[in-house]
Amino acid sequence: MAGKEKDQKGLTYKDAGVDIDKAARALEEMKEKVRSTFIPGVAHEQGSFGGIFDLEQAGLGKGVLVASTDGVGTKVRLAQKMRRYDTVGRDLANHCVNDILVQGARPLFFLDYIAMGNLEAHVLQGLLEGLVQGCRSNGMALLGGETAEMPGLYQKGDFDLVGTIVGIVPGGKVITGREIRPGDRILGLPSSGLHTNGYSLAQKVLFGVGRLRPEDSARGLGRSVGEALLAVHRSYLHAVLPLLDKFSIHGMAHITGGGIPDNLPRILPAGCRARIDTTKAPRPAIFDLIVEMGGIRREEAYRVFNMGFGFLLVLPPEEEKAVLKDLKKRGEEAFPCGEILEGEKGVELSF
């Protein structure tokens, strides 16, 4: 009886302590106050993946900069449990690169913020090693940062990891999604796993409900549960950047917190609606394990997790085959997964 009840209701992100809607409402209420800080050069709408600053509009020369700040969330708790610190540094660098890539930006430099209860040298060195690897692989400089030691605020062994990225749009052509039209096609690039979102719910399900340990194995994973969860967030820079000079990419979306339903609409213009076939993505087995063990409704799963969709490209239908061919030639497993329809801005998911 208890099992049936769990299947009907299912665990949600809110059950794990994360309320996406509450955060969105709070941010919406602050929009106008944030807008009051804008100076000449700010050239983006709030809610974009990265903030855009046009140097020419500010009278500072030519060039368009894109900046973003993010963290790796409660994935740091898993890194702490497994005493593996380099992977989350790579996660952070790659995540931030993808966020500005959406607007056509190439990364220039990165700044980190590491907070701890009491400084532990091996933890700090592990985190920085990951950041160095992530920055090197994306061709950007680790320009500086801040290490904060705050006993009493963080417990012994706790830490947080946040970063800020600044990139430049070559030629100043920012990709905003304004060129998206009904009839456009949507291509997906696969994720390597959870990336950096949904870990509060994933850990509640696997280590709470399922009573698994990070070192345990599970059907279909081919590695331990902890290793599957720590899989590094992919960077899509080297896959996507070459496309921007060859093809008419109308829009891109990095599928992070909020999944496809919250991230894809961020780039859709009025009058455009997206339809996504969820069966097209090669879904890592860790997602099925979490969904089944937690009795999570699929609608909730696709809003919390990327579910195999790491990055989306929106492009004219006549260029779809050529883009797929180009990606395949470079070893990328892209897949057609949807289209743009006429209608109210939003996303339809077919299962």
Image (tube, rainbow, N blue to C red):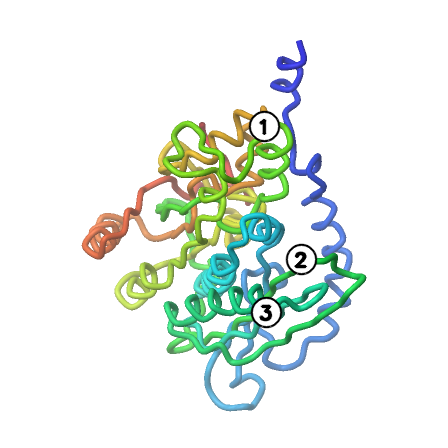
CA separation in Å, label 1 and label 3: 34 Å
What residue did someone put label 3 on? Answer: 121
At x 49%, y 30%, the residue is 289
Closest to the observer, 240 or 158: 158
At x 37%, y 68%, the residue is 137
What residue did someone put label 1 on? Answer: 210
> In this rendering, is residue 19 above or below 266?
above
Q: Is residue 67 left or right of residue 39?
A: left
Circle 2 residues within 10 Å: few <14, some 14–19, many ≥20? some
Tag 3: amino acid: Ala
| Residue 127, percent from left and from top | 53, 65
Front disc: 2 or 1: 2
Marker disc for residue 157: 2
Q: Quadrant of residue 122?
A: bottom right
Tag 2: amino acid: Gly
CA separation in Å, label 2 and label 3: 11 Å
Which quadrant of the rendered structure holds the N terminus?
A: top right
| Residue 159, percent from left and from top | 65, 60
Q: Quadrant of residue 135?
A: bottom left
